[in-house]
Image: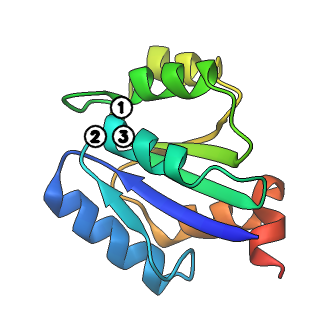
Amino acid sequence: MKFHLLIVDDDQIILMLHKRIVIREGLGNNPQSFLNGKEALEYIRRNNSSDDTHLVLLDINMPVMNGWEFLEALSSESSEANVHVAIVTSSTDKADLEKSTRYDQVFDFLLKPLAPNAITGLKQNPLLSEVFTS
């Protein structure tokens, strides 16, 4: 199995901060950073085999392709890869949290910036157990 960790956010400082946190907390050694959903979707399309698992830390509000558009595109495509999405946002709007539950790939909704306890929660999630128990 090949594990891909994607951090998708249009803020360069958040990308750098989250990359450092996920490496330090052992979520992934080589996270891939993307400034919008379109770039991340293209990466997933290029790495789409049944032994690929993607964990996407996804911002909602971005230019080019926002988080909701990314999720719509992902939902409409057939993918052999396992794609799991944790929304990481500054939005405290309950409507965003409710909307996130409409997407099968979304398993968590976290507030920016990522905190070490949020990373621990991701690592302990049953959806990702195969990644962190091997």
**Taking the image as drawn, is residue 90 in sight?**
no
Q: Are marks 2 and 3 in contact (CB under 8 Å)?
A: no
Left or right, 17 with respect to 11, comes to: right
Q: Residues within 10 Å of mark 2 (few under 14, many from 20)?
A: many
When asked about the image quadrant of residue 60, the answer is: top left
Place of residue 22 in the rendered image (x, y in percent of width and height, measured from the top left): 46, 73
Q: Amino acid at mark 3?
A: Asp
Numbered disc 1: secondary structure = loop
26 to 120, vertically: above or below = below
**Residue shown at 35%/37% (left/top)?**
37
Say which mark, if any, is on residue 114. Answer: none
Q: Disc 2 marks which amino acid?
A: Asn
Q: Residue 121, percent across and down?
A: 66, 62
Q: In what element is the residue under mark 3? A: loop
- Tag shown at residue 59: 3
* Residue 17 screen position, x and y as percent: 27, 69
**Secondary structure found at label 2:** loop
> What residue is pinned by disc 2?
36
> Looking at the rendered structure, which numbered label has been put on residue 60?
1
User: The residue under label 1 is which amino acid type?
Assistant: Ile
- Measuring 24% from the left and 69% from the top, which residue is drawn there? 16
Q: Are marks 3 and 1 in contact (CB under 8 Å)?
A: yes
